[in-house]
Image (cartoon, helix red, strand yellow):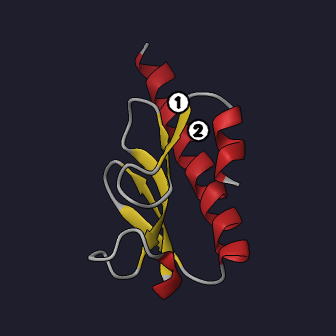
Amino acid sequence: MLSRLADSGNIVIHSSVGYPVAKYKNTGISIGIEPLNPMIRQDLTLGYIVVIRNGKASQEVNGLLNRSLPKAISTFKDHINEYEAAKSKML
């Protein structure tokens, strides 16, 4: 699902922190599937949480991945739309 976000443009997918993260280019807006235990970054089998960040705050989405990830992606897209709307008002 995260890879589909990259197809929409301006979104980069990486795992340089040890878990999958999608980030909207040049902003603090991101979504990640993070391990519950941050000391073991590469092992999501011990549990994970989906976290959305908008540059100011973070929001956790609990539940099974097949249910929490679509909700998180929707929120992620909302943050991007809000950012773009604010950016266009400044121009």
For the view shown, which residue lies furthest in the left direction? 39
Q: Does residue 84 appear left or right of residue 54 in this picture? A: right
The one nearer the camera, 15 or 1, is 15
Circle on res. 81: 2
Q: What is the x, y in percent for residue 64?
A: 66, 82
Circle on res. 84: 1
The one nearer the camera, 83 or 20, is 20
Q: What is the x, y in percent for residue 14?
A: 48, 45
Within 10 Å of the Cα at label 1, are there few (<14), some (14-19), or many (20+) other Cα atoms? few
Q: What is the x, y in percent for residue 41?
A: 36, 69
Is residue 44 shown above or below 87? below
Within 10 Å of the Cα at label 2, are there few (<14), some (14-19), or many (20+) other Cα atoms? few
Q: Tag 2's secondary structure?
A: helix
Is residue 57 shown above or below 36? above
Kind of residue at disc 1? Glu
Is residue 34 shown above or below 86? below
Q: Are discs 2 and 1 less than 8 Å apart at CB? A: yes
The one nearer the camera, 49 or 79, is 49
Q: Tag 1's secondary structure?
A: helix
Kind of residue at disc 2? Asn
